[in-house]
Amino acid sequence: MNEKIAYSDGFRIISDYFKSQGNAPFSFQTKAWEKYEQGYSGLVIAPTGFGKTFSLFMAVLMDFLNHPEHYQKGLKLLWITPLRSLAKDLARAMQTAIDEIGLDWIVQVRNGDTDPKIKAQQTRSMPDVLLVTPESLHLLLAQKQRDKYFKNLRCVTVDEWHELMGNKRGVMVELALSFLKAYIKNLRVWGITATIGNLEEAMEVLLPQAAKRIQIVAKEKKKIAIKPIFPSTVELLPWAGHLGGNLVDQVVPIILASKSTILFTNTRSQSEMWYQLLLQAHPDFAGQIALHHSSIDAHIREWIEDNLSSGKLKAVVSTSSLDLGVDFKPVDTVIQVGSSKGVARFMQRAGRSGHSPFETSTIYFVPTHSLELIEVAALKEAVKTQTIENRDPMVQTFDVLVQFMVTIALGGGFRSEELHAIVANTHAFHYMETEEWQWCMYFITAGGKIGKRYEEFHKVIQDEEGKWIIKNRRLALLHRLNIGAIVGDAMMRVKFLSGGYIGMIEEYFISKLKKGERFILAGRILEVAMVKEMTVFVRNSSGKAITPSWLGGRLPLSSNLSHFLRKKLAAAASAPSSEKELHFLAPLIEKQAELSAVPSEAEFLVEHIKTREGHHLFFYPLEGRLIHEVMAALVAYRISKLYPISFSMAMNDYGFELYSDKEIQLSQMQLEQVLSRSNLMEDVISSINSAEMASRKFRDIAVISGLVVQNYPGTQQNNKSLQASSGIIFRVLMEHDPTNLLLKQAFTEVFNQQLEEHRLINAFERINQSKIRYTFVEEYTPLSFPIKVDSLRQSLSSEALIERIQRMEKTNAQKKKRRK
Amino acid sequence: MKIGEQTITFNKQELTLNTQRSIYWKDQKTLILSDLHLGKAAHFRKHGIAIPTDTAITDLTRLESLIAYYQAKQVIVVGDLIHAGINQEVLLLESFRQRHPELHLHLVKGNHDRLSQQMGIRFGIVHHKEAFEMQQIQFKHHPADAADSSSFRISGHIHPGISLVIPPKRKVRLPCFLVSTHQIILPAFSTFTGLDSKDLSSLYQSYAISDDHIFPITRN
């Protein structure tokens, strides 16, 4: 460390504070303090539990202690966190430290949960440190006094940057930072992140073109122990979903032996199911375990989090809703049910136990089918080699941009050239064309590019000085209510008839239920009493009930994990394996080898299986369900070009199936042709319904850009005449305004996120370099069976929709006749 | 504009349902439609939501093409002609009226038609506050209870649609006519509208519209 700093008062005071707590700072912390004082911006990379908060918070305090003359009254440090629940505890920890050091700084939180009285007080006089979410920061930028708030700001810290970078909230942060940097000289910007695959890029996105920037990586590593739960026998035909329940008897003793446990599942319906399973297996758990997922009322969730912190709960069954957030000190055990789908997520979840830095985090893995044990071997190696996924930053998200422009117009206005320059400085919009900026200006000022016909549109208008502002108070209110980039599903509230809110459920699920039918939510069995507008009224019930399925929430397998999966599958074949999991699976692997083949790393396996039901082709790219969806459509399309045939398709994370009742004629040479890399994207576009996919992506875009208004002041009902679904608007724009940038964005998002163009190309390149093993089998193999029995089925056909409807009609009519 | 048709008999009258979301009653030279929602896009724009205005023009052009195609002398709108207040799009009716001075225009007031009486005077539309009747067929905005067999009614309001699952697993939603012995519910004429695809197949025969085709749906 620089001597001047090492002997400074500030360093001595902060070090003494650490000593008084019985700690010594980690070297990455002192390095961050030093670099901060030298005027750097940067990125701190450290695992959870190692004091990454204090690496920056103390840096600011120390700099203040050494150079109080650089700091004026008012807001000095702005702290952005992705989670509201995180802010409260962070603020408390910061305030405690400040008080003990003996400073008079005040730390406060400002977000959706903050009392309006405190908010009003903040707008009169800002605290010294303010913790915000990206949304509440944008809300501050939408206020007329925004210049006053940030006048004396010295540092902005973005916490959990890895959670923000890959999504549109990250773009919100980029835009806000660029805006603040333009008006505040020498503003230092720091990010804090867990390890991700693309740290260089993470820094570039947060600090584009910054002159003095540095990456500080903690040397400390969190130790993780992975313990799989083995079923008593290997099923040769593994069937997903069915095994988990059998293992509950092995899970109960683990929970009983632990102080406090979090059991992670992948979907909300799986969590509801496991909650019931645990209660059935061990009725004494009643009152001691709880259920936590994003469709459960926030107050209940908060209550659960509090009781988990205080050690009153024995176990909580949860989804990714507990991946992040404050540390629950008493939690000493984590159980993962089913694939975690990614290395980073797995490590994050493992880290929720064993909080002190040098403790080992133990995570138990409960496979939902025996093949998933391969994943344990894969995860172990990925964790050992620290092969963690990238977070790909989003670019050209015009929905977020137009929202931001309106926000800035609202908070005192802007000049087009100035704001254009600010926006172009971000990573997200660094290659935006001038015409695209112009289009956004048209969108918010004239309602689109077609100019004259939009004469009744007056959202953002120009004042006498040439600034773009918003005058209409109703529009201003509406915009404030809808700032943000998180778009909820079309959900209905679930309430007791007697009052009391339970949670949210998808409209689509409720529409299938009749009065008196029972379903499960938040671990309770509920009976539908009545449905009124967007609320379902229920009463408590008992007996058999349906577990709701929430659409979405099915996470795709990450490419890092699939790489290790392929490797381990190949390793399993080269017996005998020293790895316990692979050893356990030996009988299954043998059966696979005997019936068909186990692909080596240099091979790609395709099985042609003929059964009584019909003809199947199974492919095993191990690339995750989303990619398989695209691949299946593509391969089916290419085969149907050889000769006319219709397929139905099924897929899981390991592979996909094409099924036909007609015989599939495909030679080895034709198969190789069908799997060719050439003309890949052209064929993909011909094989999928990209407009339909784009229409789904457009849902979020429509809400973020303000085309669909989610929140109205007061009751929803008064605004019926202003409601149109994003699907309708998508159709209208496709027909009447096809060059609309937001439409273009929807198609781009389909290509980048849904089709994952880049990953798809890599997969085909790999397949093309592999030897293609083409086997013919007369029964289901261990690899094919799980795809066959438990997967999402879709159909692809070269026939036109109308012909298929008519054919369906004909069969229906015949059936009906026969019955008569 | 392509028109697919399906002719049915309703209260002994021959009616032609078409893919342009309307009914032509040949004997009476009358075109029947519902839920035009004129001015909806402009209403959105007035509130800062950037929807293109061409929807209104397209809907009116479709209406004019239908009038020309069938040589209709009379048009009955079974409610919700105008979405909200008076705006530029609603004023398109003025020129429409000038091009069709001879046309008899009837409007049965819908829940959206707040200003229908004024509109009626301004554009020469015969305004019916509750209902209108011809040849023992009643025109009303709201459908009657499905079990009600006291009258023959043609209505709209609910924007009926049907959701179909095409084997093995593709879902589509299409606008449709709902037909029973005593009632016909029209699909919304405007394309800037949503669908209510509640399953009413036990009560009505559905006629679904897919591009240029209209076809009855059998339910089992």
Image (tube, rainbow, N blue to C red):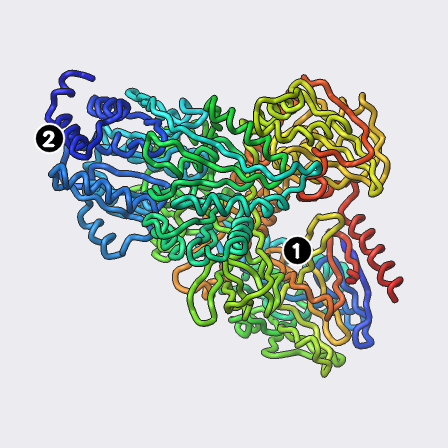
Q: Where residue A338 sits in the image (x, y, percent)?
A: 56, 40
Q: Where, quadrant-wise, is the C terminus of chain A in this rendering?
A: bottom right
| Residue at the image position 46 percent from the left and 50 percent from the top | A293
* Displayed quadrant of residue A814: bottom right
| Residue at the image position 61 percent from the left and 70 percent from the top | B79
Kind of residue indicated by mark 1: Thr
Between B166 and A451, the one lying in front of the other is B166
Residue B90 to residue A333: above or below: below
How many numbered callouts?
A: 2
* Chain on which label 2 sits: A
> Element at badge 2?
helix
Number of the front mark, 2 or 1: 2
| Residue at the image position 76 percent from the left and 49 percent from the top | B167
Residue B42 to residue A153: above or below: below
Residue B61 is tagged as: 1
Q: Where residue A494 sits in the image (x, y, percent)?
A: 49, 62
Left or right of A510 on screen, residue A7: left
Kind of residue indicated by mark 2: Glu
> Element at badge 1?
helix
Which residue is denoted by mark 2 in the rendering? A69
Q: Where residue A448 sits in the image (x, y, percent)?
A: 49, 44
User: Label 2, label 1: how many angstroms apart (C-alpha)?
Assistant: 71 Å
Left or right of A400 on screen, residue A762: right
**Co-location on one chain, circles 2 and 1:** no
Between A706 and A619, the one lying in front of the other is A619
Q: Where residue A118 sits in the image (x, y, percent)?
A: 23, 53
Instruction: State if disc 1 and disc 2 touch (CB < 8 Å).
Output: no
Can the viewer see residue A701?
no
Can the viewer see residue A577?
yes
Residue B38 is tagged as: none
